[in-house]
Image (cartoon, coloured by chain):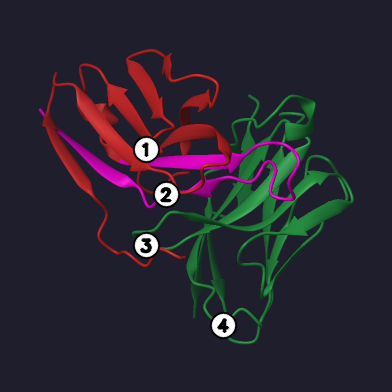
Chain colours: A red, B green
Amino acid sequence: GESVGLHLPTLSVQEGDNSIINCAYSNSASDYFIWYKQESGKGPQFIIDIRSNMDKRQGQRVTVLLNKTVKHLSLQIAATQPGDSAVYFCAEALGAGGTSYGKLTFGQGTILTVHP
Amino acid sequence: DGGITQSPKYLFRKEGQNVTLSCEQNLNHDAMYWYRQDPGQGLRLIYYSQIVNDFQKGDIAEGYSVSREKKESFPLTVTSAQKNPTAFYLCASSLSPRRGGNQPQHFGDGTRLSIL
């Protein structure tokens, strides 16, 4: 169903702490997952992605963990900085073969605030 | 610089008027997408195109139309039939999922549409 929430989940951390942003995805047939960062007034910026044949993937200061058993995705940001403050979205996509191939379905988003 | 350009950044529509939002990419991507974002919510897919001269409806296509005459361009028209057009509109592009599975979508910086 459609999400109607107007109050996004929030996470406040101190500069230098590690941040963990969580996402529950909806479709057990999804085989591709992606995280975006969106700053105010701008478009989403790609952070990292992961396919369903993996359970962990690392980038620069970021790690994505995928738990298919409980349909859970998380983004870990190491040594969080004030510039990391933004809204973070997870998104999922189905695998090949269906009419929805290539379509991303976005979560509601989480607001991350980093205090100096 | 390679990227996605959306114009204008701000757009105002009068009642009963159609308006067209521009999206151009020079990333040589096959697939292009239009999303709508409302305050405090995630992105919802309006239309997408996997190849020139072909496009499909997304989850909220009513009141919108698109064309894909060139690989680089995917304009979105918000028609007078769209009764609640005030939103932030985002265009994205990606390599075709048909080339090797789902691919990250890269976004422009959006057009904010308001009703006069």
Find out whether the residues at labels 2 and 1 contact each other: C-beta distance under 8 Å.
Answer: no
Residue at 42% from the left image edge and 40% from the top image edge: A90
Q: Which of B76 and A69 lies nearest the eye of the viewer?
A: A69
Q: CA distance from mark 3 to mark 4?
A: 17 Å
Q: Are marks 3 and 2 on the same chain?
A: no
- Residue carrying label 1: A70
Q: Give the magenta-colored segment's residue range.
A: A87-116
Q: Quadrant of the C terminus of chain A?
A: top left
Which amino acid type corresponds to the residue marked 4 in the rendered image? Lys
Check if residue A92 falls in the magenta segment.
yes
Q: Callout 1: helix, strand or loop?
A: loop
Q: Is residue B96 visible?
A: no
* Residue A103 position (above or below residue A45): below
Q: Are marks 2 and 1 on the same chain?
A: yes
* Horizontal side, residue B76 vs residue B69: left or right: left
Q: Are marks 4 and 2 on the same chain?
A: no
Q: CA distance from mark 4 to mark 2?
A: 25 Å
Residue at 32% from the left image edge and 15% from the top image edge: A61
- Disc 4 crowd rating (10 Å Cα; few below 14, some 14-19, many 20+) is few
Which image quarter: residue A80?
top left
How many numbered marks have been drawn onto this rendered protein structure?
Answer: 4
Q: Is residue B3 visible?
A: yes
Q: Callout 2: helix, strand or loop?
A: loop
- Give residue A107's mark: 2
Q: CA distance from mark 3 to mark 2?
A: 13 Å
Q: CA distance from mark 1 to mark 4?
A: 39 Å
- Residue carrying label 4: B83
Which amino acid type corresponds to the residue marked 3 in the rendered image? Pro
Q: Residue furthest bottom?
A: B16
- Residue carrying label 3: B39
